[in-house]
């Protein structure tokens, strides 16, 4: 299912969401301006590489080689489709979470969810030498928060293959997405996928989603926010 837009209202301007979309786009434009060899090195340095993360912990280079890539990887993308899909989801769901939390707490939720996503990805792919990049783990946190706060908000959705447009409750759209990520991650783990091949970081999506649900329970709503009756 492909979400197109939602109907949950907001009363504030989502400046952080705009900033994140702009930042991810600018970084990707910089990426594609590099030569293939330079870009590969750039992605390897600033993406999350599970084996490099483990080696950095062992060698005591925790901050530079472990923590920094966890955050920089959130602003890198593998392709235009990767970027557009992530930014579209952030555009749909991010504004309402920012409206609920306020700008600073929303940014904190985004970054912490992204970090949690990377850590779960590393846990399930400790032998992988491939860099993991993308904002999808952080955005999964935003989606998890939305799933909890606005379960009855309607999402205009395209059903693949038959291209049928339908309004569905957010809990259906996001619940289906999370279940698909979890089952795909489990299938990948059971199959013991080779660390030399690429693919979707399903466990990162799972980790981000769970982090978003957890954090939205801990963070209070901003004062005087608009009340949306689900």
Image (cartoon, rainbow, N blue to C red):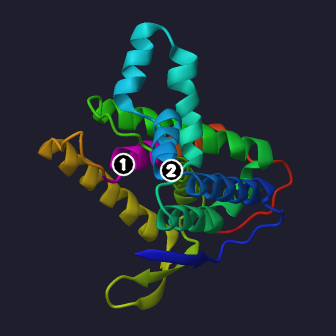
Image quadrant containing the C terminus = bottom right
Whether residues under marks 1 and 2 lie with C-beta atoms below 8 angstroms apart, the answer is yes
Q: Which residue is mark 2?
A: 134
The tag on residue 83 is none
Question: What is the secondary structure assignment of the residue under circle 1?
Answer: loop
- Horizontally, residue 223 falls left or right of residue 42, namely right
**What x and y, as percent, mark residue 209?**
47, 49
Q: CA distance from mark 1 to mark 2?
A: 9 Å
Q: Residue at x 31, y 86 (%)?
A: 161
Q: Which residues are magenta?
A: 199-210
Residue 55 figure quarter: top left
Image quadrant containing the N terminus = bottom left
Q: Is residue 149 magenta?
A: no
Q: Nearer the viewer, residue 217 or 105?
A: 105
* Residue 214 is at least partly visible in this image: no
Q: Residue at x 79, y 48 (%)?
A: 103
- Horizontally, residue 58 falls left or right of residue 16, namely left
Q: Nearer the viewer, residue 47 or 111?
A: 47
């Amino acid at each position: 299912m492909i979400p197109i837009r939602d109907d949950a209202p907001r009363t504030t301007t989502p400046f952080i969401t705009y900033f994140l979309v702009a930042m991810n786009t600018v970084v990707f434009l910089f990426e594609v301006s590099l030569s293939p060899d330079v870009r590969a090195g750039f992605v390897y340095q600033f993406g999350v590489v599970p084996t490099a993360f483990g080696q950095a912990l062992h060698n005591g280079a925790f901050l530079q080689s472990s923590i920094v890539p966890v955050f920089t990887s959130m602003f890198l993308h593998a392709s235009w489709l990767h970027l557009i899909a992530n930014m579209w989801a952030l555009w749909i769901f991010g504004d309402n979470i920012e409206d609920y939390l306020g700008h600073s707490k929303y940014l904190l939720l985004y970054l912490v969810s992204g970090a949690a996503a990377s850590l779960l990805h590393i846990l399930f792919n400790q032998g992988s030498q491939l860099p993991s990049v993308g904002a999808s783990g952080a955005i999964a946190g935003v989606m998890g928060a939305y799933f909890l706060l606005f379960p009855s908000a309607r999402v205009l959705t395209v059903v693949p293959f038959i291209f049928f447009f339908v309004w569905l409750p957010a809990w259906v759209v996001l619940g289906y997405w999370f279940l698909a990520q979890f089952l795909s991650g489990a299938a990948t783990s059971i199959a013991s996928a080779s660390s030399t091949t690429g693919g979707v970081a399903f466990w990162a999506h799972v980790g981000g989603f769970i982090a978003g649900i957890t954090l939205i329970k801990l963070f209070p709503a901003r004062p005087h926010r608009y009340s949306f009756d689900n």
